[in-house]
Image (tube, rainbow, N blue to C red):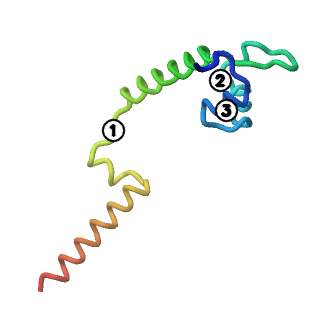
Amino acid sequence: MTARLMSIETLAIYLEASEGQVRKMVSERRLPPPTYNDKKFVRWDRKDIDAMLDSRQSFISSRASTCQQPKAADNDDQQTAGGLLVKAAQEALKQREELADP
């Protein structure tokens, strides 16, 4: 049985993060504040953490579905590493074909 109230150590393990990252996420309000906050007893409610993760996941999925992928013709205009690599490969193939044709 998983404990419902989690210390910062347990929360860090639950999120697969370090304690410092958890503190930073709480200060940036990316994680909810502790449910119980006493000097010696600081605990987060697992249900609050799960609800936050679920809401962020639904936000991320809705944002991903509204984003449009660039068209293939737009790749020439993009100065991305992938676009430049494809362009360089296409030029190399073109040069190779020109050398092969006498």
Give the secondary structure at mark 1: loop
Disc 3: CA contacts within 10 A as few (<14), some (14-19) or many (>=20):
some
Q: Which residue is mark 3?
A: 12
Give the secondary structure at mark 3: helix
Front position among marks 1 and 2? 2
How far apart marks 1 and 3 lie (CA) works out to 35 Å
Label 1: few (<14), some or many (≥20) within 10 Å? Answer: few
Quick one: label 1 or label 3, which is nearer the N terminus?
Answer: 3
Residue 41 at x, y = what percent? 82, 18
> What residue appears at the point 72 percent right and 32 percent down from the top-left corner?
24
Q: Is residue 87 left or right of residue 7?
A: left
Which residue lies under the disc numbered 2? 31
Q: Which mark is residue 69?
A: 1
The reply to whether the C-beta atoms of the residues labelled 1 and 2 are less than 8 Å apart is no
What x and y, as percent, mark residue 91?
28, 69
Question: In what quadrant of the picture does the N terminus appear?
Answer: top right
Element marked by disc 2: loop
Give above or below for 82 relative to 28. Answer: below
- Work out whether residue 21 or residue 42 is closer to the camera in this orientation and state it: 42
Q: Amino acid at mark 3?
A: Ala
Which callout, 2 or 3, points at the residue further toward the start of the chain?
3
